[in-house]
Amino acid sequence: MPQWMRRQLQRAFIGKDIRQIRLLNSCWFLYWEKHGGRPQ
């Protein structure tokens, strides 16, 4: 996971921003799939 995404997720968790957490989670899975990830 890119460092910039980790920082944003940490801020969202600390601030309990559910909307931001969901958005970043969706972005992460799209990024992961495009870069060779495979769903389990």
Image (tube, rainbow, N blue to C red):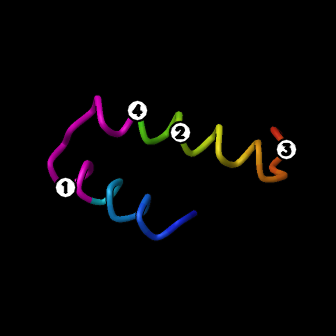
Q: Secondary structure at mark 2?
A: helix
Magenta highlight on residue 8: no
Which residue is rendered at x = 84% and y = 52% of the image?
Answer: 36
Disc 4, disc 3: CB below 8 Å? no
Q: Amino acid at mark 2?
A: Cys
10 Å neighbourhood of mark 4: few (<14), some, or many (≥20)?
few
**Mark 2 neighbour density, 10 Å: few (under 14) some (14–19) many (20 or more):** few
Q: Quick one: SS at disc 4?
A: helix
As for residue 19 lying within the magenta part, the answer is: yes
Frontmost of labels 2 and 3 is 2
Image marks 3 and 1: residues in contact by CB distance under 8 Å: no
Magenta stretch in the rendered image: 11-22
Residue bearing the label numbered 4: 22
Q: Quadrant of the N terminus?
A: bottom right
Distance (Cα) linking label 4 and label 3: 20 Å
Place of residue 37 in the rendered image (x, y in percent of width and height, measured from the top left) = 80, 49
* Disc 4 residue type (three-letter): Arg
Name which of mark 3 and mark 1 comes first in the sequence: 1
Tell me whether circle 4 and circle 1 mark residues in contact (CB < 8 Å): no
Q: Check if mark 1's residue and mark 2's residue have beta carbons within 8 Å.
A: no
Name the dominant secondary structure of the magenta segment: helix
How many angstroms separate mark 1 from mark 2 (CA)?
19 Å
Name the spot of residue 3 as percent of width and height, x first. Answer: 46, 70
Q: Residue at x 27, y 33 (%)?
A: 18
Q: CA distance from mark 3 to mark 1?
A: 29 Å
Q: Residues within 10 Å of mark 1 (few under 14, many from 20)?
A: few
Q: Name the secondary structure under disc 1.
A: helix
Q: Position of residue 4 (x, y in %)?
A: 41, 65
Give the amino acid at mark 3: Arg
- What residue is pinned by disc 3? 38
Task: State the residue position of label 2.
Answer: 27
Which residue bears the numbered disc 1?
A: 14
